[in-house]
Image (cartoon, grey):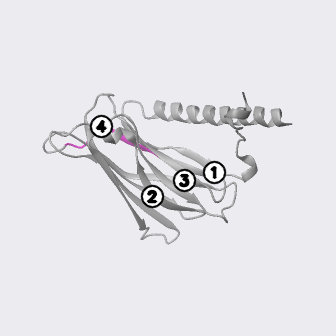
Amino acid sequence: MFINKIRRGRAGVFVVLLLTSARFLSSAQAAENSTQVSLGVVSGPPKDTVMVPFYLAPDPPGRQIGSVSATVRFQNNGVAFVRGEKGFLLDGVNADFTVELQKDPQDADRSLLQVVVATRGEPRKALREGLLMTLVFRIEENAAPGTNVVLEMEKVRADDLNNPPQSVEPLSGKNGMIEIISPESVPYVACFFFTH
């Protein structure tokens, strides 16, 4: 019985990794020939905390980008924004971020996050490709499993390192999602010490 739980846990983790890779590859193909700012797709049960990745993929890969900004719009049905967390890629380029939570003036059931990531100092360095930061959300205790909270990317902008900065074009944004699942759906991963 214990061995079966371990096997189910490993299979569950493999399936999650496989699905995440497939989503990333399909989005990369759709945004070919454009710099892309994207949010990840994550899942968790009620009362859990999830971290949504915020990615940058310059095109061409060596493109010198000094700042990225976006508005993230989402329904307040079962999730609450907690904070932003800096990715380690920002440390080496003297970069920082701000995340400001606002109520959506057009819809009381929605919230807006104003996200800005930028390098500082002279000479300024370019942002690196990859995970810039994460947006941390709490899934409410009364959130209904099976609910998908879409994180809509709007007003995406990126500027290069020119003086004055020039807008990066073409540029695309990719929505993220928080999938609320039942506690029973969480993959079981056994402790390392009990699997060896």
Residue located beneath label 2 in the image: 83
Mark nearer the viewer, 1 or 3: 1
Query: Mark 4 falls on what kind of element?
Result: helix
Image depth: mark 2 or mark 3 in front: 2
Q: CA distance from mark 1 to mark 2?
A: 17 Å
Provide residue 126's location: percent of width, then percent of height: 26, 36
Mark number, residue 44: 1
Tell me which label, 1 or 3, sits earlier in the chain. 1
Q: Give the class, few, some or many, for how many residues have Cα within 10 Å of label 2's Cα (few <14, many ≥20).
A: some
Label 3 sits on residue: 150
Report helix, strand or loop for mark 2: strand
Q: Residue furthest left?
A: 163
Q: Is residue 57 above or below residue 105?
A: above
Image quarter hosting the N terminus: top right
Q: Tell me which label, 2 or 3, sits earlier in the chain.
A: 2
| Residue 124 picture quarter | top left
Q: Is residue 142 above or below residue 157?
A: below
Say which amino acid is labelled 4. Answer: Gly
**Residue under the point 61% across and 48% down:** 43
Cα distance between the residues tagged 2 and 4:
22 Å
Instruction: Give the spatial CA distance, label 1 vs label 4.
Output: 31 Å
Which stretch did the figure color magenta? 166-174
Which residue is the site of mark 4?
Answer: 92
Circle 3 sits in a helix, a strand or a loop, which is it? strand
Label 1 environment density (alpha carbons within 10 Å; few <14, some 14–19, many ≥20): many
Looking at the picture, which amino acid does disc 2 mark? Answer: Arg
Mark 4 or mark 2, which is nearer the start of the sequence? 2
Residue 42 in the image: state x and y as whole percent.
57, 46
**Where's residue 189, x and y in %?**
70, 38
